[in-house]
């Protein structure tokens, strides 16, 4: 029998969020608490379990309703182990699924948040009903996920589809992952900020410094300056957009998707970034493959983590 609803856990950021999701994508009984990662993995997992218990009690749902967890990686969804995650200091090879199942008495599925987001888009979002999708999460870093014929493509150990670390340039800047020339090193929030900070050391960056005031010159500041016609800001976003467009062209060649969906905070820059990306895509993709591939924005917004976690739970446990 199909599940009427599931529990979704979003482990991203400084907060833990838990909610009930219906099969049609309705989110209800949402609750959150601070992660307090400095207290260690066991304390965080106990906090997740407590929040699950609260939401389940509020929704009056039984122990047969499973849980999906969307977490930053790298992690192994096959074993349920989080190997490492930057926003949870001290987490090394933590058996999250095993511990959470023991504390809650529920079935638990775990996946990388980018992969979960791809599933969320296919089940509830802009790609609803789409069987072949590439999803990019443009945030502080760049993540994403790939779905082919309805199946999540994540490799042998669930570590695959790190599309933010696709090579853009052999001689490019060093990425946060340690490699050279990744897409993330060109088009992520931190990469745009790093380029803007370099420009700000010259006279070309005076307007960027004015707009930032005492604060950092983040991607939003660059977009504001670009909207004013500032040449330096426009050049920064065009550089990021070309890298993004080249990567999307490669994804089209490799995966032959029906749709590309763009989400994450940096996606809110809109066509200031994506305009250049759209112009660049045809230079890096086969004409027969690119002509029917729309590039659209995510419709899930700030709820992407919960939608993704819920979609994971439905995919894993529905009719199981």
Image: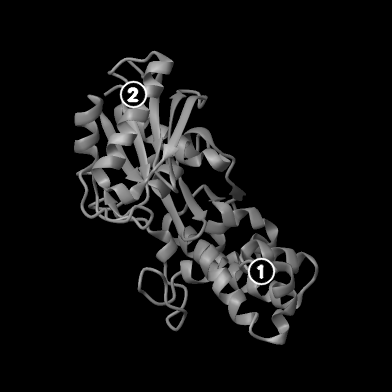
Mark 1 lies on a secondary structure that is loop
Rendering quarter of residue 33: top left
The residue shown at (61%, 49%) is: 296
Q: Position of residue 35 (x, y in %)?
A: 39, 43
Q: Furthest-right residue in view?
A: 228
The residue shown at (63%, 66%) is: 215
Is 9 drawn above or below residue 20 in the view shown?
below
Q: Position of residue 31 (x, y in %)?
A: 46, 29
The residue shown at (66%, 61%) is: 220
Q: Position of residue 205 (x, y in %)?
A: 70, 79
Q: How far apart are the alpha carbons under marks 1 and 2?
A: 44 Å
Rendering quarter of residue 87: bottom left
Nearest the viewer among 112 and 126 is 112
Q: Position of residue 182 (x, y in %)?
A: 43, 71
* Residue 284 in view: no
Q: Quadrant of the C terminus?
A: top left
Residue labelled with disc 2:
53
Residue labelled with disc 1:
214
Mark 2 lies on a secondary structure that is helix
Number of disc labels: 2
Is 129 drawn above or below residue 280 in the view shown?
above
* Dot label at residue 151: none
Is 30 drawn above or below residue 115 in the view shown?
above
Rendering quarter of residue 58: top left
Q: Quadrant of the N terminus?
A: top left
Mark 1: few/some/many CA within 10 Å (<14, 14-19, 20+): few
Q: Is residue 294 left or right of residue 166?
A: right
Nearest the viewer among 236 and 3 is 236
């Amino acid at each position: 029998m199909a599940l009427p609803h599931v529990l979704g856990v979003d482990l991203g950021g400084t907060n833990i969020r838990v909610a009930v999701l219906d099969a049609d994508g309705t989110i209800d009984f949402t609750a959150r608490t601070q992660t307090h990662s400095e207290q260690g993995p066991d304390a965080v997992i106990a906090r997740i379990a407590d929040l699950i218990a609260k939401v389940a009690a509020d929704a009056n749902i039984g122990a047969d309703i499973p849980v999906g967890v969307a977490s930053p990686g790298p992690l192994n969804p096959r074993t349920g182990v989080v190997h490492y995650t930057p926003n949870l200091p001290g987490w090394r090879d933590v058996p999250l699924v095993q511990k959470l199942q023991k504390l809650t008495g529920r079935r638990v599925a775990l996946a990388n948040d980018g992969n979960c987001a791809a599933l969320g888009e296919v089940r509830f979002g802009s790609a609803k009903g789409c069987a072949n999708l590439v999803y990019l999460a443009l945030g502080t870093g760049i993540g994403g996920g790939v779905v082919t014929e309805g199946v999540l493509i994540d490799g042998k150990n669930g570590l695959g589809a790190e599309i933010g670390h696709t090579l853009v340039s052999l001689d490019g800047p060093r990425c946060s992952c340690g490699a050279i020339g990744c897409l993330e090193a060109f088009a992520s929030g931190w990469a745009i900020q790093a380029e803007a900070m370099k420009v700000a050391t010259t006279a070309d960056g005076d307007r960027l410094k004015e707009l930032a005031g005492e604060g950092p010159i983040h991607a939003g500041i660059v977009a504001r300056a670009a909207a004013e016609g500032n040449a330096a800001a426009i050049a920064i976003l065009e550089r990021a957009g070309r890298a993004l467009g080249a990567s999307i062209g490669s994804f089209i060649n490799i995966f032959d998707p029906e749709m590309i969906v763009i989400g994450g905070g940096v996606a809110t820059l809109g066509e200031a970034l994506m305009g250049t990306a759209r112009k660049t895509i045809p230079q890096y993709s086969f004409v027969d493959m690119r002509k029917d591939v729309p590039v659209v924005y995510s419709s899930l917004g700030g709820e992407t983590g919960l939608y993704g976690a819920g979609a994971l739970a439905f995919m894993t446990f529905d009719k199981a």
